[in-house]
Amino acid sequence: MALFLSSFLVLFLETALIRWMPAYIRLLAYFSNFILLASFLGIGVGCLLATRRRNLFVWFPVIQFAVIAAVDRLRLELALPSTSTIYFSSGTTAPVVPVESTLLLPLLFVSVAVLFVTVAQRMGRDLSGRPPLRAYVINLLGSLTGVAAFALVSWLELPPSLWFGVAAAAALPFVVQDRRWIAAVNVVLLVGSLAIVHRMEAGSLWSPYYRITVFQDNADTVVEVNHIFHQSMAPVAHKEYFYQWPYAVFGDTFGEVLILGAGTGTDVAAALRHGAKHVTAVDIDPVILRLGAERHPDQPYSDPRVTVVCDDARHFLRTTKTRYDLVVFALIDSLTVQSSFSGVRLESYMFTKESFDAVRERLSPRGVMVLYNYFREKWLVDRLANTSAAAFGRDPVGHVHQDRAYLAVMLAGPRLAELSAPPPLPADVTAYGQSHAPSPAHLLARDASVVLATDDWPFLYMRAPELPRHYLAALALVLVVSMLAVWFARSDGQGRIRTAGLAPVTPTSRWSWHFFFLGAGFMLLETKSIVQFALLWGSTWSSASLAIASVLVMALASALVASRVEIRRRGPIAAALLALIAINYLVPVGRVTFDSRIAESLFYGALVFSPVFCAGLLFSSSFKESTSTAEDFGANLLGAMVGGVGEYLSLLAGYRFLLILVAVCYLAAIATRRSPDRLFLNCSGLRDEVGL
């Protein structure tokens, strides 16, 4: 039970911090996988310290309180002087601490890692003294329960005070094992942490994606997400002209209208105002849709002509059979990443070449697509214009307001052939929070050299495939910190302990490169699988939770198979894994089409997750022979952290390239596996394995 509970606490707390910290520290909204990497480092080091005499869990309430208090006091604002990567800043008057460089990331990284060291040491002790595979199965069951529990609180839209309340309840049985006065102090600290979190969340709504705040600014109702202006609600007649632009160009002639990223409903209100017969309003966030239904002055969602769909827009395009006269990209900018496993933002797959192809296929013979937003950089306007030209076979009709944050409006689709001349250019923009001075538009002239975003390279807000210097600097420091932490853990973790109810554990001085490479390969494979799963089922929170759960289920299934079947030869498993990796490289999601949605899901589900099962078999069969469960598990998790760092290479080479790295990692794992004879010698203390 202790191992199950500690495993649950590790995964649940990790997920909670990944959701909670970026809501207050703007910097982390674009680097949330640094929290994931920090947790892997902390868990790995904690497992390496499982044999240390001192119980580090006693420090968990103290460190958690310090981390929460620091987040409460700091308002870190991103201020990177870059024109090649776009980050959204707060745009609010709230006090912030400017962050001129992501070099602050290592400080946040270390804070989170130290927190997880305290929890993971306890988990490592619970892993030791049990048969390895039995311990691993219990660990996976605890982790799966953690995923399910956080999915439940997300579905119920519960606030963070309840998240941390669940974590505190899971930690309490370990806290009360200390001396009475220490336990009392730590209980007070856990309660104090909950009090701070509760005070911080006052007046906020928590959707599965954001911390949402709503306030009145004169006549407008303003919606902020994670301290950033997101939307304002006002009568459509008082809003910017572009909401009504397609109707000004083509008249009130649209029957079926699809709004992607409908939000609080202004685009829907514009369609209704201009006589649309039916409007399908798609948005990923249920809370923002609900706010629009309750508070938009035009009440667009109460109109019987409107069908509201809470779904990922890309997934909706894959599943709908309807043809539309007008498809609107409604100021789609999610301001958050898709998941903690990648740097892909929530809306990135909406602006790839494949997405525009899907829109083209869903247009009626006289259909048109309209896209508008404040794009901030000319190269982003060029990218979208190039993508539109590639998908529709002709240049879009559009214009740009350069002095209004590169506001651009583009029209594409077969109906453009009906235009005898380009529409007249607007003379100015009426925009929330901006000057009303004249801002004349200029015809769109695209730079064809700007590369398109694709499903393989979906980084919409990067000018070109590269590894930005601020990423490199932060990742280099993270790796240095990690190496120092591992060196300290291995040099300081010697000794002999006896934990409650467990047999004495004697540490070894060896380092398992085999488990390290297995961890790195598995992390990269998991990242690629989750990204592919989002393409198949959408980038919703539920799909992300299901993808993570599916990976854990595959790992659990492989562990159960390995516990019941003696795997004498791992060569065939390794060969099958490498073959499946090659097939995934050659057949990306969407390459093979199906008429049946069920058949498509089964085919790609098997294609994406079968390598995870084979990788799990390799790990489980090796872990079954482990003579140092906690240390090998720690090496595996540290390898996973390095694999997470390697995920950033996708910024340079795309996600398919990660499969090459996966193959390299598993080849290295096979090459560094200990033979039974060498394992016997190691157990006898007659020789050491390869050291760090």
Image (cartoon, rainbow, N blue to C red):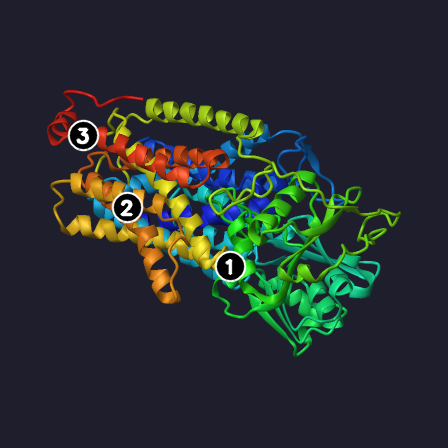
**1 or 3: mark nearer the eye:** 3
Give the Cα distance between marks 2 and 3: 25 Å
Where in the figure is residue 472, as x and y percent of width and height? 52, 27
Q: Quadrant of the C terminus?
A: top left
How far from the left and from the top, in percent, is residue 515?
Answer: 28, 34
Report the number of numbered marks.
Answer: 3
Q: Which residue is mark 3?
A: 674
Asked where in the image residue 486 lies, by quadrant, the reply is top left
According to the image, label 2 marks what residue? 580
Decide: few, some or many residues near mark 2? Use Cα within 10 Å; few <14, some 14-19, many ≥20.
some
- Residue at the disc numbered 1: 154
Which x, y percent locates residue 149? 43, 58
**Residue closer to the observer: 421 or 320:** 421
What is the CA distance from the residue labelled 1 to the residue labelled 3? 43 Å
- Circle 1 — which element? helix
Local SS, label 2: helix
